[in-house]
Image (tube, helix red, strand yellow):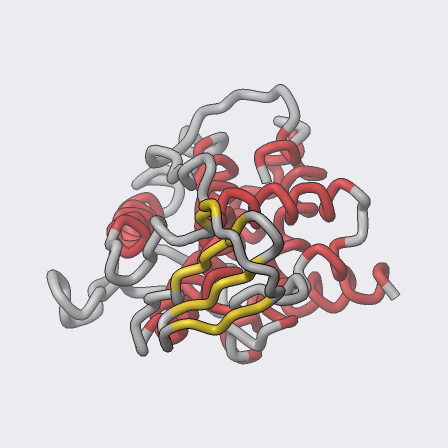
Amino acid sequence: MSFLFGSRSSKTFKPKKNIPEGSHQYELLKHAEATLGSGNLRAAVMLPEGEDLNEWIAVNTVDFFNQINMLYGTITEFCTETSCSVMSAGPRYEYHWADGTNIKKPIKCSAPKYIDYLMTWVQDQLDDETLFPSKIGLFEFPFVMNRYTVKAFHTGSFVCHLHHCLFRPGVPFPKNFMSVAKTILKRLFRVYAHIYHQHFDSVMQLQEEAHLNTSFKHFIFFVQEFNLIDRRELAPLQDLIEKLGSKDR
């Protein structure tokens, strides 16, 4: 959430992905921000009552992309071809890039190059309306009918009151949405892991560690809530994850 970063530099690594104002997804984002503002991150990641799981995951995936985009944007001057000649998270974990389309065979590359590939790929997924539809939401129109709920069509529902109706179209997420979202989140985790292992000293010099820790804690609680990343993928930061979790109990 943007408010986590206060008044610090708005520099980002890639252009920020915006959720259209007035859309239902924008309302969901504001709901999440309000819940986060209470300080209860466990509650903030829970699916709001009556909401669609895919849409909730989509909104939060966009937000995590923006958060990581901003966090990495603050330390790009320290993450160079020379200082980070391989994409790693400590001495035991090294990542090679492949997207299955443009680069089918995993290639070894520097951290800045890997993260550039990664964030460009994520941005392409988020911009694909067939994967992350943004034009879904509630539409209000006059309707004289004294009924409370009318189901109509298999693609959506009407919620009707005395003088108006709200129509929520069915959420047209593709069947592979969850698989794509999991891959995006798994890859975004690697940016957190690289920052913590290779650049935490720089983060501390910039006095950004509180922002990084809050963002990562929010991310981890979210992926844990919906089982979105395999535990083995989280191994590079497992000690930190356990520490963050124990503080919340």
Which quadrant of the figure has residue 21?
top left
Can you give x and y, in whole percent of width and height, for residue 196 in the image? 58, 50
Residue 150: image location, x then y, percent: 52, 70
Residue at the outermost right position: 249
Residue 110 seen anywhere in this rendered image of the structure? no
* Vertical position of residue 157 compared to residue 11: above or below: below
Q: As rendered, which of 200 and 64 lies closer to the eye? A: 64
- Count up the numbered dots: 0
Quarter of the figure with the C terminus? bottom right
**Residue at horizontal 45 percent and vertical 59 percent from the top:** 168
Q: Residue at x 38, y 39 (%)?
A: 17
Q: Position of residue 244 (x, y in %)?
A: 76, 60
Q: Is residue 120 left or right of residue 73?
A: left
The residue drawn where x is 54% and y is 58% is 145
Toward the viewer: 59 or 233? Answer: 59
- Residue 143 seen from this side: yes
238 left or right, relative to 158? right
Instruction: Place residue 159 in its image quadrant.
Output: bottom right
Residue 45, percent from left and from top? 66, 60
Q: Is residue 111 left or right of residue 185?
A: left
Query: Which of 124/100 is in front?
Result: 124
Please tell me which residue is depicted at 30% across the width and 72% down the height of the picture.
174
